[in-house]
Image (tube, rainbow, N blue to C red):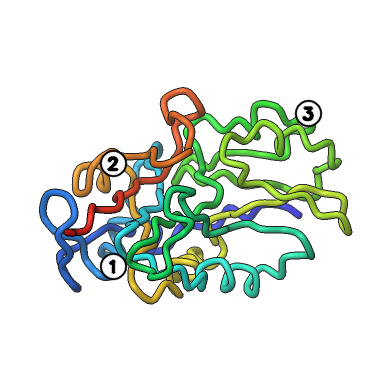
Amino acid sequence: MEIPTSRRKALKACFLTGIGLALATVEGSLPQKIHPRHANASQNREEGLQLSFLFDQNRCTGCKLCARSCKQANNWEKGVEWRKVIQDPSTKGAKMPRDKTLLSISCNHCAKPACASVCPVKAYSKRKEDGIVVQDQGKCVGCKYCLYACPYQALSYGEETKTVSKCHFCYERQDQGEIPICVDKCPTGALQMGELDFLKRRVGTIQQVGNLPNPSIVGKPSIIIVPKRALPK
């Protein structure tokens, strides 16, 4: 399948605003949801900007609507997971959601994607206008090199199609002025998105929690994490 190159719409320039429910996490507060910039901003975007996910561990309840909505929208074949919600082993015994430390993870659309560097048929490419790592499944030969190379285990192999697939940041939805389905369906605002540099300035630069690999040596992922705060005893 050929990757479309249509002009980006307003929501491609999403960023966090002060609108929404305040939550004391790091410096300042986070909004409940993100909102698009003015349409002219996205039309004049400079190349080199990078879209990123933001995940707030304090808001995740473990409902898994992000993963379920992705599955439904993209019709995953059996055994395939483009997004999954994992729990920190240190909180495995927790019974209440507030006591669990969770992480919703998918492809992180890295600055230097390992999948693209090892693919022998050049099925992966990184879009200049937003940094999304896209895959042309029509080129995939099922060698699984990318699957083994990904430090986040974010790619899946389909036994029926004999090909690898992954999150594509819902670029087609965004072309139509919509946000990614996982972000749209998250009921608490735990999963959000925006431009990476803006998120770093607004929220911080944490990209590693729990057992995640060191981001500085695994391709520079496009994800920002607001880590779980210690609850008062």
Query: For mark 1, what is the residue?
Result: 35
In this rendering, position of residue 25 left or right of residue 92: left
- Which residue corresponds to the image point at 55% horizontal and 57% vertical from the top-left? 6
Quarter of the rendering occupied by the N terminus: bottom right
Say which quarter of the image contains residue 205: top left
Name the element at disc 3.
Answer: loop
Q: CA distance from mark 1 to mark 3?
A: 39 Å
Marks 2/1: CA distance? 16 Å
For disc 3, the neighbor class at 10 Å (few under 14, some 14 to 19, many from 20) is some
Choose between 161 and 28: the one closer to the eye: 28
- In the rendered view, would you say 47 is above or below 57? above
Residue shown at 47%/42% (left/top)? 131
Question: Mark 3 touching mark 2, by CB under 8 A?
Answer: no
Which amino acid, mark 1? His
Q: Which mark is residue 197?
A: 2
Residue 70 horizontal/vertical position (percent): 59, 68
User: SS at mark 2?
Assistant: helix
Q: Position of residue 157 (x, y in %)?
A: 78, 49
Q: Quadrant of the C terminus?
A: bottom left
Report helix, strand or loop for mark 1. loop
- The 10 Å Cα crowd at callout 1, few under 14, some 14 to 19, many 20 or more, is many
In which image quadrant can residue 76 be found? bottom right
Residue that protrudes farthest toward the left in the picture: 28
Residue drawn at 50 percent across, 64 percent down: 175
The numbered mark, 2 or 1, whose residue comes first in the sequence reads 1
Residue extending furthest top? 217
| Residue sitting at x 67%, y 46% | 155
Q: Tell me the number on the disc at residue 120.
A: 3
Going by the numbered disc 3, the residue's amino acid type is Pro
The mark total stands at 3
Sooner in the amino-acid sequence: mark 1 or mark 3: 1
